Amino acid sequence: MIQKSEILQSFSHGCIVSKLWLCNELEKHASIRSTIHIFGSWYGNMALMIYLRQKIAFDKIINYENRPIMLIESNHVLDALNFEQKLDIMPVDCNTVTLPANPTQLLINTSTENMQNAGWFQNIPG
């Protein structure tokens, strides 16, 4: 069950400001990416910001989250923007994901403080 307070927290001033800062920094270095992987995507706010700002070209964004209900809710919002062709959702523990080596992909994790261990980091392709 979704908690209204948790959705509101995902749009708190601090969460939005930090994601906007990250967008600004990424836009300086990552103008074209094949795939953007967002670990711990929560309600998809990072994907939403990247999509709406339109400053990073990408083929696909994949939101990873271990709580499937959050992915379903974020998918509803992003679908309303006709984003569905460029969006995949993965209900999975990010610590178990192994990404293929691809220099044009981008991995974002703004939820490191909520992850139980560093398996996600150890699985980043070299």
Image (cartoon, rainbow, N blue to C red):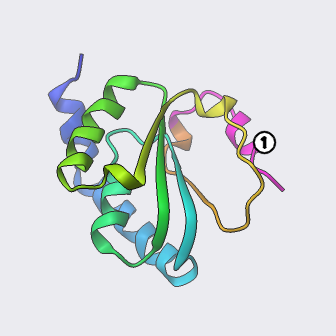
Q: Nearer the viewer, residue 32 or 44?
A: 32
Outermost residue toward the bottom in this view: 28
Task: Give the side of residue 77 with respect to residue 63, left or right.
Answer: left
- On-image quarter of the C terminus: bottom right
- On-image quarter of the N terminus: top left
Q: Which segment did they paint magenta?
A: 114-126
| Number of on-image labels | 1
Residue at 18% from the left image edge and 40% from the top image edge: 8
Q: Which x, y percent locates residue 69?
A: 32, 24
Q: Which x, y percent locates residue 47?
A: 38, 55
Residue at 35% from the left image edge and 33% from the top image edge: 71
Q: Image quadrant of residue 97? A: top right
Q: Which x, y percent locates residue 48?
A: 30, 57
**Residue count near mark 1 (Cα–Cα under 10 Å), binned few <14, some 14–19, many ≥20:** few
Which amino acid is tagged 1? Gln
Task: Look at the image and say whether residue 87 sits in the magenta stretch.
Answer: no
Q: Nearer the viewer, residue 54 or 107?
A: 54
**Residue wearing tag 1:** 122
Task: Give the side of residue 120 with respect to residue 42, left or right.
Answer: right
- Chief secondary structure of the magenta portion: loop
Task: Give the side of residue 15 with respect to residue 5, left or right.
Answer: right
Outermost residue toward the front in this view: 85
Determine whether the residue tagged by mark 1 lies in a helix, strand or loop: helix
Q: Which x, y percent locates residue 20?
A: 35, 68
Residue at 37% from the left image edge and 65% from the top image edge: 50
Outermost residue toward the top in this view: 1
